């Protein structure tokens, strides 16, 4: 039982390049989230999806787009990467119904030069 | 506005000593509260949660936390720390909005 799987685990980009972070879950949860983690700032919500076909902005959505491809998959895209987007990105799902209890992937460490 | 504050950026304790990590929150009603642990290079794992009822909640790995409404606190405790407890700990809050996290407290364990 894999839970929440993120790819890639590491990525280095140059400023202006684009990339997509992939997230897949086998927990059959409706809600999925993308957070970024920066030193001293905890986790900040980028985007979330309450169900297949719906997405909403979180606290720090600028520079990102998301796609909820189906119930299992939720991807995060950086169209034109900036050094400020250097971070560790976490995908999570939520135990239902709306418990706030999150299950996390292992993270994707992104460096933008 | 809702917020979570973890006053200690890092704490060092000796192995076998007791531990208390502080968490204060701001929210207008009774929240759902959580503690997560993050080992280096890993995602976050739920230690324990408070939804309602008994204000002292037990979690995994011998951790417990106490909800104190009057102090808006949800402190994490462990009677005897093991070297494997060295990690970063996050307090989190949800209450009809998406989960928000404190900045985290890094725990160092001395031999």
Image (spheres, helix red, strand yellow):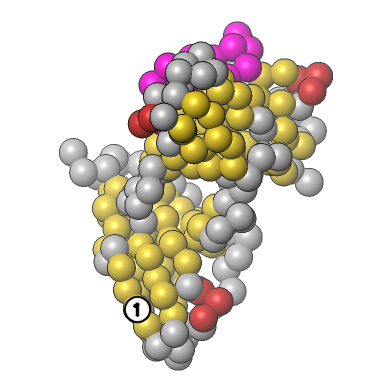
Residue found 59% across the figure and 42% down from its top = B10
Find out whether residue B58 is within the magenta segment.
yes
In this figure, which residue is indicated by the disc labeled 1? A12
Query: Which quadrant would the C terminus of chain B be assigned to in this image?
Result: top left
Farthest residue in the bottom direction? A16
Secondary structure, mark 1, is strand
Q: Horizontal and vertical percent for residue A68?
A: 38, 62
Q: Is residue B23 visible?
A: yes
Tell me the subunit letter for badge 1: A
Q: Which residues are magenta?
A: B54-66
Residue found 44% across the figure and 85% down from its top = A113
Find out whether residue B13 is within the magenta segment.
no
Label 1: how many Cα within 10 Å (few below 14, some 14–19, many 20+)? few
B97 relative to B109, above or below? below
Residue found 71% across the figure and 26% down from its top = B73
A55 relative to A14, above or below? above
Q: Horizontal and vertical percent for residue B50?
A: 57, 22
Q: Quadrant of residue A38?
A: bottom right
Q: Is residue B72 left or right of residue A103?
A: right
Farthest residue in the left direction? A1
B81 relative to A2, above or below? above
Q: Quadrant of residue A109?
A: bottom left
């Amino acid at each position: 039982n894999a839970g929440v799987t993120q790819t890639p685990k590491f990525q280095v980009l140059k400023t202006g390049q684009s990339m997509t972070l992939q997230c897949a879950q086998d927990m059959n949860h409706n809600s999925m989230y993308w957070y970024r983690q920066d030193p001293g700032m905890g986790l900040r919500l980028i985007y979330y999806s309450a169900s297949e076909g719906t997405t909403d902005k979180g606290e720090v959505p600028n520079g990102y787009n998301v796609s909820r491809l189906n119930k299992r998959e939720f991807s995060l895209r950086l169209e034109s990467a900036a050094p400020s987007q250097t971070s560790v990105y976490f995908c999570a799902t939520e135990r239902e119904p709306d418990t706030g209890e999150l299950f996390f992937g292992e993270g994707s460490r992104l460096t933008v030069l | 506005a809702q917020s979570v504050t973890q006053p200690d950026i890092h704490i060092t304790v000796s192995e076998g000593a007791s531990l208390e990590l502080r968490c204060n929150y701001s929210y207008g009603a009774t929240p759902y509260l959580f503690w997560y642990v993050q080992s280096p290079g890993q995602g976050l794992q739920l230690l324990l949660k408070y939804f309602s009822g008994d204000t002292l909640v037990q979690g995994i790995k011998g951790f417990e936390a106490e909800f104190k409404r009057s102090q808006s606190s949800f402190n994490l405790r462990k009677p005897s720390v093991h070297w494997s407890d060295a990690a970063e700990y996050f307090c989190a809050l949800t209450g009809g909005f998406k989960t928000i996290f404190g900045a985290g407290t890094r725990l160092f364990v001395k031999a």
